[in-house]
């Protein structure tokens, strides 16, 4: 089967659906691994969307905070443009039906670490992503210009005369088909699943980066991965499932980090203690774990208000039989957000003609070496809307001659080692070698091990994409010899007694 559209969008998170909605007037296909708008990271977002709309605040101050968080490695023009677009992004989300929390008639504004003002628009307390995605999904259902392909995975990009002209897709029955379009938009999210501990759901495994790289698109800033300091520790360490996030708004509300001895270790690490930048906090937690300690978040002082203000956190703790009003919450750091990705210009165009990238999979440069909290939902909508509107204005394409599935081939039967085992090994390697602190000797060994695993997998195995992205990330981390932002590098792992970080 093959079909032609004006635009093919891969991924149905906040970036993919914003682009699709804005492309009204074009015939748009949205391909997604699970159910439209429910798979991917977007519906898990807790804090909300950053926008300078409060008294005394300004887009220039928002831009400044973004640059500071990104260690000024950001693309300045992109930062300025995004901060200026943010109020309009919030208006657009309200217009499509998002019900943000309000105080009276005004939008309620939360404050998060490294923001100079309260500027986080949120919904349902800490259920912002779920509400935004509910509204986007409802708008997509009402839009006749969008056709959806659920439970389908894009395996390759199709090229003709050096331009991307379509995608090779596989559904969950293993059937392959092609979707052609002169404009292909990758909105495939982040890479968290490549790490043992992650807040990201299973769809966030960097597959968009693998297919873009194989097609010849340039990737950038691959080494910049943000680790969240407070994910709910797994019941069984090392199980590798998606870990539930304990929002930093909880620390904003007064929760403190302590170890099993009751020591509030952040006091000695940073003047802002628990409100220090994410990377500082994450590395302090990592160091505690490496020295055999157990780390907890103490939110008991919030008492019953915790249940109303942080319903998602409360529910997550309950699932682990923890009552956060009376008990400490065990936490670990976890891979959370990828600042790097497919290199794009201010119009979201990659280095390949016909290929665009949007949202977390793109590297617009707005985040620099570290992302300011709540800037990523904003980025997805801001860049997605403008791209969608622009693509809808493009002249309608002539018929693209079918190229066929081309470089994509059926996997050989009977892989010599199980893909699940290879994936588990990859996640462990990435966590220990390319995690919060990257040790030069371990990175070198990791490249060899990843290449060995790649050689043992048969052509067409999906895990090859994950291994490829893992290797590209490790290679980029090796090249970046200075510690900056989310990337910390040291010559070798210190010898510590006691338990290693799990
Ligand atoms: C727990 C958590 C809390 C967060 N809180 C916030 C917050 O408060 N504020 C904020 O700004 N950011 C937050 N973030 C980050 C933010 O949620 C993400 O950066 C953002 O949602 C990414 O959106 P996206 O559309 O780029 O990708 P995603 O929402 O991850 O969507 C990716 C899509 O691509 C699809 N896909 C992937 N590969 C393929 C393929 N090969 N073929 C077909 N489909 C594919 C997936 O199925 C999915 O639909 C949070 C993240 C997490 C995990």
Image: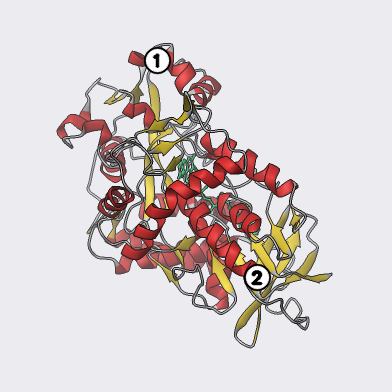
The residue carrying pointer 2 sits among few (fewer than 14), some (14 to 19) or many (20 or more) residues within 10 Å by Cα, namely many
Where does label 1 land, which residue? 327
Residue 376 appears in the picture as rendered: no
Numbered-mark total: 2
Residue 9: give x, y in percent of width and height. 65, 62
Left or right for 379, reference 83: right
Separation (CA) of disc 1 from disc 2: 48 Å
The single residue placed furthest to the bottom in the displayed view is 161
Where does label 2 land, which residue? 156
> Disc 1, disc 2: CB below 8 Å?
no
Q: Which residue is depicted at the point 65% across and 57% down? A: 20
Is 449 in front, or is 31?
31
Q: Which mark is residue 343?
A: none
Q: Quadrant of the N terminus?
A: bottom right
Q: Could you say whether the residue bearing mark 1 is in a helix, strand or loop? A: loop
Q: Could you say whether the residue bearing mark 2 is in a helix, strand or loop? A: strand
Left or right for 16, reference 292: right
Q: Earlier in the sequence, mark 1 or mark 2?
A: 2
Q: Which residue is depicted at the point 39% across and 12% down? A: 303
User: Measured along the vertical axis of the image, is residue 38 above or below residue 75?
Assistant: above
Residue 396: give x, y in percent of width and height. 71, 76
Is 393 in front, or is 442?
393
Left or right for 19, reference 146: left
Q: Quadrant of the C terminus?
A: top left
Residue 174: give x, y in percent of width and height. 78, 60
Residue 41: give x, y in percent of width and height. 54, 45
């Amino acid at each position: 089967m093959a079909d032609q559209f004006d635009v093919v969008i891969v991924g149905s998170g906040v970036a993919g659906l914003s682009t699709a909605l804005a492309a009204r007037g074009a015939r748009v296909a949205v391909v997604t691994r699970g159910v439209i708008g429910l798979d991917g990271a977007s519906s898990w977002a807790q804090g909300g969307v950053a926008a300078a709309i409060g008294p005394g605040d300004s887009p220039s101050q928002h831009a400044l905070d973004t640059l500071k968080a990104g260690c000024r490695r950001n693309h300045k023009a992109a930062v300025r443009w995004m901060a200026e677009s943010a109020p309009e992004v919030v208006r657009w989300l309200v217009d499509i039906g998002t019900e943000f929390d309000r105080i009276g008639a005004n939008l309620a504004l939360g404050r998060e670490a490294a923001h100079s003002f309260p500027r986080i628009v949120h919904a349902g307390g800490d259920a912002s992503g779920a509400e935004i995605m509910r509204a986007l999904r409802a708008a997509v259902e009402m839009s006749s210009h969008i056709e959806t392909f659920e439970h389908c995975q894009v395996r390759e990009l199709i090229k003709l005369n050096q331009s991307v002209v379509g995608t090779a897709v596989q559904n969950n029955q293993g059937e392959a088909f092609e979707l052609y379009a002169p404009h292909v938009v990758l909105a495939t999210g982040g890479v968290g699943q490549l790490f043992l501990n992650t807040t990201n759901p299973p769809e966030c495994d960097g597959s968009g980066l693998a297919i873009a790289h194989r097609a010849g698109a340039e990737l950038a800033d691959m080494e910049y991965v943000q680790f969240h300091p407070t994910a709910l520790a797994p019941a069984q360490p090392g199980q590798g499932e998606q870990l539930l996030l304990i929002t930093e708004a909880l620390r904003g509300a007064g929760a403190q980090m302590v170890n099993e001895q009751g020591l509030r270790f952040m006091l000695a690490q940073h003047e802002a203690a628990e409100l220090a930048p994410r990377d500082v906090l994450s590395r302090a937690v990592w160091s505690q774990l490496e020295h055999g300690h157990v780390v907890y978040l103490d939110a008991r002082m919030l008492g019953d208000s915790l249940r109303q203000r942080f319903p998602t956190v409360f529910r997550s703790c309950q699932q682990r039989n923890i009552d956060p009003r009376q008990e400490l919450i065990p936490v670990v750091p976890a891979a959370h957000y990828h600042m790097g990705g497919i290199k794009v210009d201010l119009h979201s165009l990659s280095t390949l003609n016909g290929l665009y990238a949007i949202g977390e999979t793109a590297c617009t440069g707005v985040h620099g070496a570290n992302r300011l909290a709540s800037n990523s939902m904003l980025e997805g909508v801001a860049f997605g809307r403008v791209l969608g509107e622009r693509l809808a204005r493009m002249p309608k394409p002539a018929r693209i001659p079918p190229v066929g599935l081309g470089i994509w081939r059926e996997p050989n039967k009977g892989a010599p080692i199980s893909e699940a085992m290879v994936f588990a090994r990859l996640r462990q390697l990435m966590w220990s070698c390319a995690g919060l602190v990257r040790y030069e000797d371990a990175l070198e060994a990791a490249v060899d091990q990843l290449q060995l695993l790649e050689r043992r997998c048969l052509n067409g195995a999906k895990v090859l994409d994950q291994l490829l992205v893992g290797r590209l990330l490790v290679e980029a981390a090796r090249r970046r010899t200075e510690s900056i932002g989310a990337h910390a590098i040291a010559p070798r792992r210190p010898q510590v007694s006691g338990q290693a970080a799990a």
